[in-house]
Image (cartoon, rainbow, N blue to C red):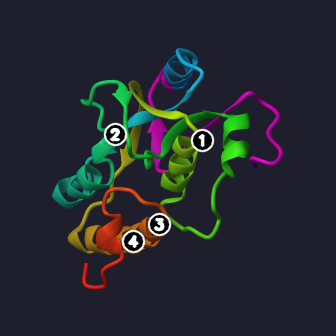
Amino acid sequence: GLREVRTEWVAFLDSDVVPAPGWLAALHGAACEAPDRFVVGAIDYAVSGGYWGLCLWATEFSGVHPYLPDGEVQGGASANMLIRTADVRRAGAFDEAFAAGEDSLLAARLRDAGLRNWLCAAARGAHVNISGLRHCLAHLAWLGRWSARFRRRVPLRGSVAARLWPL
């Protein structure tokens, strides 16, 4: 899709995230405030998923919760992003070798290109959480494996631990 887009901006929203009214306008407004930034929106939840669904949401999206203040962030996995198309192309777009963490890798590449990663809490998307301990543990294990692979390639917080087998 990125090869075909002809717009100045490209927005990304995961398929299990429902945008709030005004979502795109809030992202665009924050992005236009400074030419050296790309914007991630906050991830709230649409369905709690019970205790285990909320635990998974709290873990997976801790860096982009809706109660956090607007400002520069170091994370990148948000399921909710707006980036200038030229910046995405210059940074190398998404690495299709990753089933998860590809947005974090793109964010790291964009930061390496000199852009700032900006959180806009008003640009909310609501995640549909799935209930159950079994789902929570399976999803965390899956994310953990991909996170370790990603951190072996990109020096972020946790990268040292990902290179040590037991961790």
How far apart in space, not on screen, are marks 1 and 3 (Cα)?
18 Å
Asked whether the beta carbons under mark 4 and mark 1 sit within 8 Å of each other, the answer is no
Whether residue 140 is visible here, answered yes or no, is no
- Tag on residue 84? none
Q: Earlier in the sequence, mark 3 or mark 2?
A: 2
- Tag on residue 150? 3
Query: Label 2 is placed on what type of residue?
Result: Val
Q: Earlier in the sequence, mark 4 or mark 1?
A: 1
Mark 1, Cα crowd under 10 Å, few <14 / some 14-19 / many 20+, is few
Q: Nearer the viewer, mark 3 or mark 2?
A: 3
Number of marks in the image? 4
Location of mark 2 (residue): 64
Location of mark 4 (residue): 148
Query: Label 3 is placed on what type of residue?
Result: Phe
Q: Earlier in the sequence, mark 2 or mark 1?
A: 2
The answer to which image quadrant residue 24 occupies is top right
Image location of residue 92, percent across then percent down: 69, 52
Q: Nearer the viewer, mark 1 or mark 3?
A: 1
* Closer-to-camera residue (118/54): 118
Query: Label 1 is placed on what type of residue?
Result: Ala
Image location of residue 33, percent across then percent down: 53, 14
Location of mark 1 (residue): 113
Mark 2, Cα crowd under 10 Å, few <14 / some 14-19 / many 20+, is many
Q: Secondary structure at mark 4?
A: helix
Specify the segment rendered in magenta: 2-23
Asked whether the beta carbons under mark 1 and mark 3 sit within 8 Å of each other, the answer is no
Asked whether the beta carbons under mark 2 and mark 1 sit within 8 Å of each other, the answer is no
How far apart in space, not on screen, are marks 2 and 1 (Cα)?
22 Å
Image location of residue 42, percent across then percent down: 38, 34
